[in-house]
Image (tube, rainbow, N blue to C red):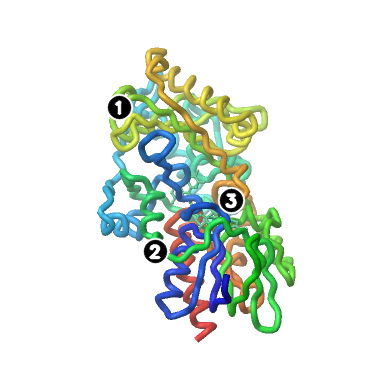
Amino acid sequence: MTNRDVIVIGAGAAGLAATARLLADGFDTICLEAADRIGGRAHTDGTIFGQPFDMGARWLHNGPVNPFIGIGKSLGLDMYLMPYHGHTKGDDPYGTKLWAEADRFSTRLRSAADAGQDIPAATLFTDTDPWSKTAAMMTALLMGRDLHEVSTADWGVGTVEENWFCREGFGAVVARHGAEVPVSLNTRVSVISYKNGGVRIDTDKGSLSARAVIVTVSQGVLAAGNIRFDPALDNDRLQALDGVTMGRYNHVALQFPPATIPVKDDAWVTYPVRDMQDGSFQGGAFHCNIGGTGMCSFEHAGAFADALEAEGEQTAIGFALDRLVDVFGTGIRKTFVNGHATQWGRNPFTCGAYSGALPGQAHLRTSLRRPHTEHIHFAGEAMHPDEPATVSGAHKEGLRAAQEVSRLLS
Ligand SMILES: Cc1cc2nc3c(=O)[nH]c(=O)nc-3n(C[C@H](O)[C@H](O)[C@H](O)COP(=O)(O)OP(=O)(O)OC[C@H]3O[C@@H](n4cnc5c(N)ncnc54)[C@H](O)[C@@H]3O)c2cc1C
């Protein structure tokens, strides 16, 4: 633990990009990471199922502007365009009614966003069709929160067109790309203080100082006060942390032998969801036969994700398996091999899944980018103006902050 020009806090997509860029610019830089691995919320596990499974990010959104597609290809990884295969239970096996209903809801959201309205998405929901709730739930999945917490303006900035997958996992792309970046793992930062033109960082492995710092931890970690700042964060930032909060989104992984679930590879499988008393959706959707394997993932968000986390992993696996049995019949239960449920809400190093603005608060994202004193800078997914809540947005924000710090120190 020696003193540096720049210390980057957090080795997710933003922190890895920032560290690599500053080193390339000639600054003595190290990245401090609380966890025992790099990648943050982009993490592919290869141990639980003996094959890759993305615990966090899986979709490489916005193909034409997503640098990780080219990065993955240059690393020799198997990158492929997402196929659009749908399957739904009941009277609409090809999902025609569901997607028509989803388009209707998106059109209403788009009109509000384009008109500059920052209102709860829930106010635009009309329950006109048996598939309305399931269609609207897809917006909740995308935003990681229930419709009354979705800002139409915030929904309007993020686009997720032309999705790609990596057969080895999105987390694997990020980890392999960042493998050479110098990171001190298992190093949790607790205090960042600015004094006499320099910054002091206290960690559970000791203290060190730097000319500048880039903080890339999630909004959830900052809002929880897990890192203390001296001087304390100003009111504008605290207000932004109240307005741009962490969404909740989890995967329940279900492993079957390949070709058990009778749909095409990477099919999106839906069933009619119900809602809970508070208007949140009690259900989710499935990504099945991921990359041609027998892995399926039950995707769910918002208060329902909180509820399943609280009930524990076995309940979450049981719920997901029961819903898949509802769609494909009891025969698949016998072939079920293994399951796992993510718990991003309880992860102390993320405190949630990804950022989203509450209704009326979308304008606050811009204040998150502002440095705290001249020498403490921020980066991460929450700050990207067009690609918030994505890995590519985090990467680009890391590069943006590195450039600012580079200019400051030159
Ligand atoms: C379930 C889920 C699904 C998702 N799906 C997608 C998707 O399909 N496509 C997509 O593009 N994005 C998706 N995302 C969002 C995407 O993963 C994030 O936007 C992105 O990875 C965030 O990168 P980051 O560098 O900003 O933050 P992080 O990845 O959170 O990196 C911050 C790092 O800081 C570390 N840290 C925290 N506290 C401390 C401390 N005190 N001291 C030192 N280090 C600390 C953390 O351990 C972490 O490694 C998903 C996220 C989740 C959780």
Q: In the rendered image of this protein, does residue 360 appear above or below residue 97?
A: below
- Asked if one can make out residue 66 in the rendered structure from this viewpoint, the answer is no
Depth check, mark 1 against mark 2: the one in front is 2
Q: In the rendered image of this protein, does residue 166 appear above or below residue 265?
A: below
Front residue of 174 and 304 = 174
Type of amino acid under label 2: Glu
User: N-terminal of the two: label 3 or label 1?
Assistant: 1
**What residue is pinned by disc 3?**
350
Front residue of 197 and 282 = 197
Front residue of 308 and 97 = 308
**What residue is pinned by disc 2?**
180
Type of amino acid under label 3: Thr
Quarter of the image for the N terminus: give it: bottom right
- Asked if one can make out residue 147 in the rendered structure from this viewpoint, the answer is yes
Q: Tell me the crowding category of disc 2: few under 14, some 14 to 19, or many 20 or more residues within 10 angstroms, Cα based.
A: few
The mark found on residue 258 in the picture is: 1
| Residue ID at (29%, 25%) | 259
Marker count (numbered): 3
Disc 3 element: loop
The mark found on residue 85 in the picture is: none
User: N-terminal of the two: label 1 or label 2?
Assistant: 2
Type of amino acid under label 1: Pro
Front residue of 246 and 42 = 42
| Residue ID at (59%, 59%) | 187
Query: Residue 110, image x and y in percent?
Result: 48, 49
